[in-house]
Amino acid sequence: MPPPSATDLSQRSAIAVSFAGFRAAWRSVLAYVVIGTYVGIGALTHDFGFGLGWAVASTALVWAGPAQVILVSALGAGAAPIETALAVGVSSARLLPMVISLLPLIRRPKTPFRALILPVHLTAVTMWIEALRLLPHVPREARIPFANGVGLGFMSAAQVGTLVGYYLATSLPPLLTAGLLFLTPISFLISTTRNCRLVSDWLALVLGLVLGPLMAAWQMGLDLLWTGIVAGSLAYGIHRLREALK
Amino acid sequence: MSELHAYALLVLVGFLPSEIWRVLGLVAARGIVDESELFMWVRAVAIAVLAGVIAKIILFPPGRSRACRW
């Protein structure tokens, strides 16, 4: 999708800008990937005996696919709440660097704290990928409503998926749900590749792909956060070194 | 599990453990300016985390291996 033109967005109201973000989300292939993922999550939620209202509330409140899979399967299988909370917390640690790298793009010196609550809650992999790609083309004063629109666009896609999955739970072939789950990492990979601009971005992507499974195999806990810190710092360090040698 | 109990668990065990990272990010991002060096480092860390998630899901599909909670 072509990025919205800057002059166009700076003259529109916050609602119109949010709507532009909402539409940008639905024009992204990731919206359909989100639907696919959440069909799987909706079906899972149904199978573990939770209500439809609970499924919808879970997508709105937790808003992190892996965390929801863990939450539903652990609670449904009778795991202790504290263990479930820890597993959910570990799986959602990836949100921390995403929020930190998104905020400087949308915040202005006078932005009140409360204006950041919604975009921060809406931050998830999909929203982060598309926000990073599109926000540089959006005038700074329009970025918060635009990011909210993108986030709400993806969340509405997720809710569509949740509802469809919940209702079709009994008739979905397991192979289809497995296929849908495989679509997610592939599309995340392609979208992230498209977003890489700096040498450090590319290095971080490649190093993360290699280190992630190694750290996981090592079973050290919080392996994704360590992957991020080690691979990200290496990538940044190499980038700095290249700059210094120029 | 009663209805109320299920919603209480959703908030305490699902919502809060995820949201805490977003709130920590909000606090930690104070004072970071885009295009700054710190911003570039955090961006590299975030991309590496996502790459790690992707590689793990591809190599160890969820549900098959206990080693990998994605």
Image (cartoon, rainbow, N blue to C red):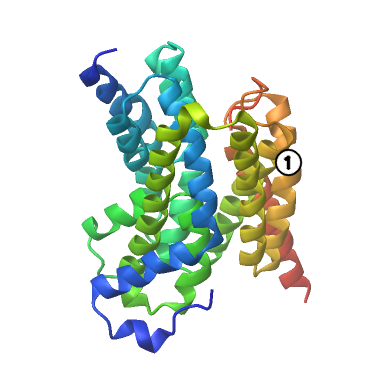
Quarter of the image for the C terminus of chain B: give it.
Answer: top right
Image quarter of residue A226? top right
According to the image, label 1 marks what residue? A211
Q: How many marks?
A: 1
Local secondary structure at mark 1: helix
Residue drawn at x 41%, y 11% is A80
In the image: residue A132, left or right of residue B29: right
Taking the image as shown, residue A245 lies to the left or right of residue B32, namely: right
Residue A152 appears in the picture as rendered: yes
Extreme residue toward the front, this view: A171
Residue at the (76%, 44%) spot, across then down: A210
Q: Where does residue A49 sit, x and y in percent of width and height?
A: 38, 19
Q: Locate residue A240, reporting x and y percent.
A: 69, 65
From this view, report whether residue B9 is shown above or below residue B15.
Answer: above
Location of residue B39 in the rendering, given as x and y in whole percent from the top left corner: 51, 62
Which residue: 66% across, 53% down? A189
Is residue A109 shown above or below B19?
below
- Residue placed most toward the observer, A44 or A242: A44
Viewer can see residue B33: no
- What chain does badge 1 belong to? A
Residue A141 picture location, percent across and down: 31, 76
Position of A186 with respect to A18 (left or right) is right
Q: Residue furthest bottom?
A: A7
Residue drawn at point x = 60 percent, y = 46 percent: A184
What residue occupies the far right of the structure in this picture? A245
Q: Nearer the viewer, residue A101 or B62?
A: B62
The kind of residue on which mark 1 rests is Leu
Q: Is residue A143 or residue A127 the one in the foreground? A: A127
- Quarter of the picture holding the N terminus of chain B: top left
